[in-house]
Image (cartoon, helix red, strand yellow):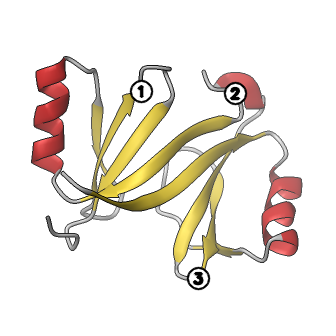
Amino acid sequence: MPLASLDHITINTAKPDETVEFYTNLLGMKDGWRPPLDRPGKWLYVGDHPVIHLFFVDDATQAETGDFDHFAFLGSDFAGMKAKLVQRGIAFRENRVAGGSTMQLFFPDPNNVKVEINFPPNLKK
């Protein structure tokens, strides 16, 4: 189950306008397409890739990890990774990206930091 790359980080923000302005105007990222998720937010792109996922919240400390929500990797073996998590007794949640075919696994590391691995169908082992 090789990881291909770091995919994105997710930040909860109670300051949506200031945060979008910071990443777009200061760092040159672009506001781009985002799937129909159940929480409001924006995806900010570097080139063709959305590297900052923002969730707009009323109180940024809602998440267990404060403003930082999680980091994500790209992976290439959904079934193999799922089997490893089951074998080690690590609780996880799986998801299919809304409007797409990418599968995801979410689970905590030993420090309770949320890890996400995305498994797009076009990424081969």
Q: Residues within 10 Å of mark 3 (few under 14, many from 20)?
A: few
Q: Quadrant of residue 56?
A: top right
Question: On the image, which quarter does residue 98 sit in?
Answer: bottom left
* Side of 123 where 113 appears, left or right: right
Q: Is residue 40 left or right of residue 78?
A: right
Q: Residue furthest front?
A: 2
> What residue did someone put label 2 on?
66
Question: Can you say whether 62 is above or below 18 in the image?
Answer: above
Secondary structure of residue under mark 2: loop
Residue type at numbered disc 2: Gly
How far is the residue under mark 3 from the one under mark 2?
28 Å
Q: In the current view of this chain or complex, which residue is farthest to the bottom?
A: 47
Q: CA distance from mark 3 to mark 1?
A: 29 Å
| Residue 48 x, y percent position in the rendering | 52, 81
Closer mark to the observer between disc 2 and disc 1: 1
Where residue 82 appears, as percent x and y from the top left, is: 16, 37
Tag 3 and tag 1, C-beta contact below 8 Å: no
User: Which residue is denoted by mark 1 in the rendering?
Assistant: 109
Q: Quadrant of residue 101?
A: bottom left
Q: Distance of mark 2 from mark 1, alpha carbons? A: 16 Å
Q: Quick one: label 2, few (<14), some, or many (20+) residues within 10 Å?
A: few
